[in-house]
Amino acid sequence: MSATNDRQRIMVIDDNQEMLNLLNRTLELEGFEPIVVTDGNSALTLLDEMEPDLVILDSMVPGVDSLLMLDLIRGRSNIPIIMLTEEYDMETLRRVLSLGADDYIRKPFSTRAFVARIRAKLRRTRPEVRMSQ
């Protein structure tokens, strides 16, 4: 990518095409550059090549167990990771956070809350990021 492109890259790892379409469109409309990946193996390959600013990781990813995927990403980078989950049991959520996720969002969710959480994580890691109106 050119140094003149200042759009932040958000990698979305999910195998649900409907969810990917929604997240891709939402991120584009909010000024981000989405990197859409449908399986864990491709995500690991692209992680180093694309250097995303944040990762959205679904709790059910084909090719690699999502908790292993979380651990592998965390082992390579301190990049913010937000888990998407349908799980409501507190033990699973506690485990996800203890393995290195920065946050989790339960499905279904509001796209406004989704974007607000992304921006909050990006502000923490890159203070020059400002909320858009």
Image (cartoon, rainbow, N blue to C red):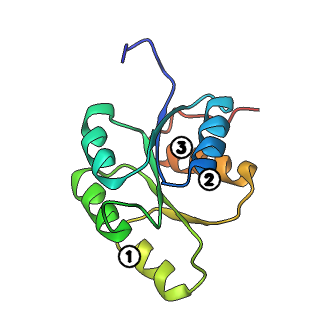
Position of residue 61 relative to residue 52, above or below, is below
Q: Which mark is residue 98?
A: 1
Say which of 124 and 24 sits in front: 24
Question: Which of marks 3 and 1 precedes in the sequence?
Answer: 1
Percent across and percent down for residue 17 are: 57, 48
The quarter holding residue 64 reads bottom left
| Element carrying mark 3 | helix
> Looking at the image, is 64 positioned above or below residue 4?
below
Instruction: Name the N-terminal-most of marks 1 and 2.
Output: 1
Q: Quadrant of the C terminus?
A: top right
Residue tagged 3 = 123
Left or right: 91 in relation to 73: right
Between circles 1 and 3, the one closer to the viewer is 1
* Viewer-side residue, 3 vs 72: 72
Nearer the viewer's eye, disc 3 or disc 2?
2
| Mark 2 nearby-residue class (10 Å; few <14, some 14–19, many ≥20) | some
Q: Earlier in the sequence, mark 3 or mark 2?
A: 2
Badge 1 vs badge 2, beta-carbon distance below 8 Å: no
Residue 128 position within the rendered picture, expressed as x and y whole percent measured from the top left: 51, 32
Q: Position of residue 90 (x, y in %)?
A: 55, 86
Label 1 to label 3: alpha-carbon separation: 21 Å
Quarter of the rendering occupied by the N terminus? top left
The residue carrying mark 2 is: 117
Q: CA distance from mark 3 to mark 2?
A: 10 Å
Q: What amino acid is at disc 1?
A: Ser
Q: Nearer the viewer, residue 126 or 119?
A: 119
Amino acid at pointer 3: Arg
Label 2: element kind: helix
Amino acid at circle 2: Arg
- What element does badge 1 sit on? helix
